[in-house]
């Protein structure tokens, strides 16, 4: 199950909900995020925040928006946000992971075009 890691990340930086709200408004004043929205993310009570909201909160915390999302396994235990249910961080051939490639840390190349026989 997906969950938000806002509280965990903010507390590690010594922030309270009020601190996070003030910092969010200071760094992204156009976002106009309410204290209620920050508190809902903090308490993991919201299920569908906008991308703009996640971006503003991530900026305030100095992390990437994807870092705000974590997973719990079926038993409610934390699963490392960088891996999927215990899968290795490297591909079977010892190459870069998809995550590394998307983050620009890998040497893999995305094809220029989809083969013509591929249908969607």
Image (cartoon, rainbow, N blue to C red):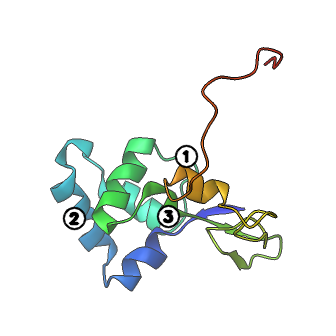
Please report the residue visible at 35 percent of the width from the left and 58 percent of the height from the top: 57
Is residue 72 shown above or below 35?
below
Against 61, residue 106 (above or below) is above
Q: Nearer the viewer, mark 3 or mark 1?
A: 3
Q: Which residue is mark 1?
A: 48
Residue topped by disc 3 = 67
Q: Position of residue 50 (x, y in %)?
A: 45, 42
| C-alpha gap between disc 1 and disc 2 | 22 Å
| Whether residue 67 is situated above or below residue 48 in the rendered picture | below
Q: CA separation, marks 3 and 1?
A: 16 Å
Mark 3 vs 1, N-terminal side: 1
Q: Earlier in the sequence, mark 1 or mark 2?
A: 2
In percent of width and height, residue 85 lies at: 78, 69
Q: Residues within 10 Å of mark 2 (few under 14, many from 20)?
A: some
Question: Between 67 and 37, which is closer to the camera in this rendering?
Answer: 67
Residue located at (19% from left, 56% from top) = 27
Q: Are marks 3 and 1 in contact (CB under 8 Å)?
A: no
Crowding at label 1, few (<14), some or many (≥20) Cα neighbours within 10 Å? few
Residue 83 rendering spot, x and y as whole percentages: 69, 67
User: Under tag 1, what secondary structure?
Assistant: loop
Residue denoted by label 2: 23
- At horizontal 29% and vertical 68% (from top left) the residue drawn is 20
On the rendered structure, is 97 left or right of 75?
left
Instruction: Kindly state the secondary structure of the residue where label 2 is placed.
Output: helix
**Residue in front for this viewpoint, 103 or 3:** 103
- Answer yes or no: do the residues labelled 3 and 2 have beta carbons within 8 Å? no
Q: Residue at x 82, y 76 (%)?
A: 75
82 and 94: which is toward the camera: 94
């Amino acid at each position: 199950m997906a969950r938000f890691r806002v509280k965990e990340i903010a507390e590690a930086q010594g922030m309270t909900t009020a601190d996070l709200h003030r910092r969010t408004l200071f760094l992204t004043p156009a976002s106009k995020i309410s204290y209620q929205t920050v508190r809902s993310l903090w308490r993991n009570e919201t299920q569908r925040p906008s991308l703009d909201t996640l971006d503003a909160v991530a900026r305030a915390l100095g992390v990437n928006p994807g870092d705000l999302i974590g997973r719990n396994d079926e038993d409610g235990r934390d699963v490392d946000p960088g891996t999927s249910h215990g899968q290795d961080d490297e591909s079977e051939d010892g190459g870069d992971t998809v995550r590394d490639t998307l983050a620009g840390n890998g040497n893999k190349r995305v094809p220029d075009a989809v083969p013509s026989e591929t249908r969607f």
